Image: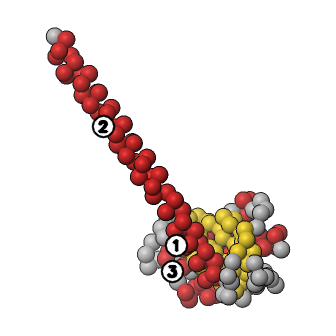
Amino acid sequence: MKSTVFRDMVKPVLVLTVICLVAAALLSAVNGKTAPVIEENARIKADATRREVLPGANSFTEVDCDLAALDITGAYKEDSGLGYVISSAHKGYGGDVTVTVGISPEGQIVGLNVDVPAETTGVGSKAGRADYVARFIGLSGDSSSVDTISGATYSSTAVKAGVDAALAAFGKIR
């Protein structure tokens, strides 16, 4: 009877526990190897985006200030004085819409990158198209002069909110 209880109840629990421990150890080892690579790739992509929205920029210094209330995810000053790059994330229809705004020292938008990865293709993704993004170039006050996209109101509203947050943050850090 004891061997039946061990074989039927205890042994399967022990085997599953060992399998779980081995799997957890392997996942931890893989994460330890890949996490630095993933972080470096994210840093490279963020640097490329900053250079894209602020033409002629070479290097950036992160601006140290509390801008969380504005939903700012990053604020950087270009080291040679070309301007600032400010990133913000706001809720669209399918998820966060990340907006990275290049702002001249005078406060005018000189570049804009919109990342709409979770928005519906062909609808919400229109908020990331070049023709819509171009409407924001040259703005300096707020985005009220730019209309939302019919059928993609959530996504385009998120873009406008991101632009407005970046401009408000610029006013605080300048």
Q: Position of residue 26 (x, y in %)?
A: 37, 46
Quadrant in which the N terminus is drawn: top left
| Residue underneath mark 1 | 116
Mark pair 3, 2: CA separation:
47 Å
Closer to viewer: mark 3 or mark 2: 2
Q: Tell whether label 2 touches label 3 (CB within 8 Å).
A: no
10 Å crowding of disc 1: few (<14), some (14-19), many (20+): many
Q: State the image coordinates of residue 104 (x, y, percent, origin top left).
A: 76, 84
Residue 169 horizontal side relative to residue 152, left or right: right
Q: Which residue is mark 2?
A: 19
Could you say which quadrant of the image residue 115 lies in?
A: bottom right
Q: CA distance from mark 1 to mark 2?
A: 39 Å
Residue at image point 64% right, 77% down: 50
Going by the numbered disc 2, the residue's amino acid type is: Ile
Relative side of 3 to 136, left or right: left
Q: Which mark's residue is nearer the viewer, 1 or 3?
A: 1
Label 1 to label 3, Cα distance in Å?
Answer: 9 Å
In the rendered image, which quarter contains the C terminus? bottom right
Q: Which of marks 2 and 1 precedes in the sequence? A: 2
How many numbered dots are placed on residues in this image?
Answer: 3
Residue 165 picture location, percent across and down? 72, 70
